[in-house]
């Protein structure tokens, strides 16, 4: 249903629109603040150069519908933090968020062999909480009154998922090269 | 940013760091006793890099940092980092670089001065941190200034053949104890 792909300059105007959308901003801290096109080009360049950060655009049927941004932890601590996964608010409630998240985690666990992935979610972002729980995330901390918007504070839930959880829940069905492996096995 | 001089009890004070203090960080963090619950004890540990860090830290408005002085000698550093001025939230940290001075209450007093400054001068809403669960001294120092546990992160990092859990804490102005 969705494809994570390399972001290109033509995506930036849409990224800017999402970062300015109050529905997106209510749901999550934004990866970047709205800015001039030249600033966005610079951000894309800087992100591409950074060896610890990764940005993907999310497509469905060759149409840009989202982005996902995350960071590897450090050279001595293998892990990945999902910083923000945005689906265009006009495309919410169609399953794109879960599908893109599944593709992302398939890549992280099955292809990169990352042992642990973490995410921080506002406690009232029920759609994101549901996606995380369905994937296999577990809560390890809850920050109280962390984010402020709409005149009130909201808690933040911190969750992680490790490779064992991935293997138990998704390992049998979600493989990066499933068809090729099957083909090789029959040769 | 560098924080102003804050004088506390038992000969402990927080002072604005100097370039010479930053150069001491290298000697401190490579010692096994100091780095046990901290970094990997390697990296670009040169005076030139410390000069760059000193300049960047001084210019950075999303962090505030102090040198911890004990009887007017630099013995560590502390600060509040990644400050989000909209949420008024930041992540605190502390290192006592002189392990011969562990257990003397220096960290407790430094955390008290730092936390008091966060509420009374910076008007922060919240400060949070990650501390190795096995580092009882650091946890206790933070708890005395009102930090409460908000989570526990299992097997956070690997040292000397063992996995270490991390304790996640958070503090608010209303959790800061009144001075007797």
Image: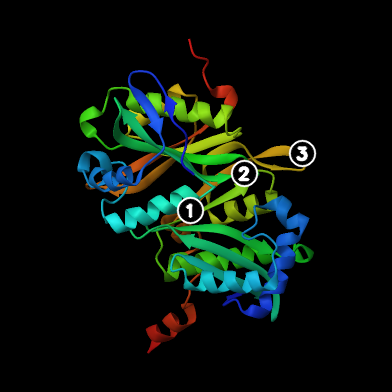
**B165, A168: nearer the viewer:** B165
What residue is disc 1 on?
A161
Kindly tell me whether residue A57 is visible in this rendering. Answer: yes
Answer with mark 1 or mark 3, whichever residue precedes in sequence: 3
Please rate how many residues cluster around mark 2, counting C-alpha atoms within 10 Å: few if below 14, some from 14 to 19, many from 20: some
Q: For the image shown, how many numbered marks are present on the structure?
A: 3
Q: Residue furthest right?
A: A90
Q: Nearer the viewer, residue A81 or B177?
A: B177
Question: Marks 1 and 2: same chain?
Answer: no
Nearer the camera: disc 3 or disc 2: 2
| Subunit of label 3 | A
Relative horizontal placement of residue A84, taking residue B103 as reference (left or right) = right
On the image, the x and y values in percent for residue A140 come to 50, 42
Where residue B165 sits, quadrant-wise, is top left
Residue at 58% over, 51% down: A133
Callout 2: SS? loop
Mark 1 secondary-structure assignment: strand
- Residue A183 position, x and y percent, is 44, 86
Q: CA distance from mark 3 to mark 2?
A: 16 Å
Instruction: Work out whether B159 lies above or below B112.
Output: below
Q: Is residue B172 left or right of residue A92?
A: left
Residue at mark 2: chain? B
Q: Mark 1: few, some, or many residues within 10 Å (few <14, many ≥20)?
A: many
User: A13 above or below A33?
Assistant: below
How far apart marks 1 and 3 lie (CA) works out to: 32 Å
- Distance Cα–Cα, label 1 vs label 2: 30 Å
Residue tagged 2: B85
Q: Which of the two marks, 1 or 3, is nearer to us in this view? A: 3
Q: Is residue A7 above or below residue B37?
A: below
Tell me whether the residue at label 3 lies in contact with that at label 2, contact meaning CB atoms closer than 8 angstroms: no
Chain assignment, label 1: A
Task: Classify mark 3: helix, strand or loop.
Answer: loop
């Amino acid at each position: 249903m969705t494809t994570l792909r390399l972001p290109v300059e033509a995506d930036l105007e849409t990224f800017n629109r999402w970062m300015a959308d109050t529905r997106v901003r209510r749901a999550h801290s934004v990866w970047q603040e709205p800015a001039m096109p030249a600033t966005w080009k610079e951000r894309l360049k800087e992100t591409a150069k950074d060896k610890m950060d990764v940005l993907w655009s999310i497509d469905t049927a060759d149409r840009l519908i989202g982005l996902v941004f995350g960071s590897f932890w450090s050279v001595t601590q293998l892990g990945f933090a999902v910083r923000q996964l945005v689906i265009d608010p006009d495309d919410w409630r169609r399953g794109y968020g879960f599908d893109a998240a599944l593709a992302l985690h398939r890549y992280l666990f099955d292809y990169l062999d990352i042992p642990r992935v973490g995410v921080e979610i506002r406690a009232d972002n029920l759609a994101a909480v549901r996606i995380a729980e369905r994937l296999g995330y577990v809560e390890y901390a809850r920050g109280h009154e962390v984010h402020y918007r709409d005149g009130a504070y909201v808690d933040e839930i911190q969750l992680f998922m490790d490779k064992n959880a991935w293997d138990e829940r998704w390992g049998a069905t979600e493989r990066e090269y499933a068809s090729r492996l099957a083909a090789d096995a029959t040769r | 940013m560098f924080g102003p001089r804050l004088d506390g009890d038992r000969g402990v004070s927080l002072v604005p760091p100097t370039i010479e203090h930053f150069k001491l960080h290298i000697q401190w963090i490579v010692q096994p006793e100091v780095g046990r619950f901290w970094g990997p004890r390697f990296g670009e540990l040169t005076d030139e890099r410390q000069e760059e860090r000193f300049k960047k830290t001084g210019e950075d408005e999303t962090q505030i940092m102090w040198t911890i002085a004990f009887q007017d000698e630099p013995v560590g550093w502390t600060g509040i980092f990644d400050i989000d001025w909209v949420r008024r939230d930041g992540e605190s940290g502390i290192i006592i670089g002189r392990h011969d001075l562990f257990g003397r209450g220096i960290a407790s007093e430094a955390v008290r001065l730092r936390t008091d400054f966060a509420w009374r001068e910076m008007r922060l809403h919240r400060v949070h941190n990650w501390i190795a669960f096995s580092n009882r001294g650091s946890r206790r120092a933070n708890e005395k200034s009102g930090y409460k546990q908000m989570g526990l992160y299992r097997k956070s990092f690997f040292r000397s053949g063992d996995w270490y859990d991390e304790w996640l804490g958070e503090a608010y102005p209303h959790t800061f104890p009144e001075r007797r």
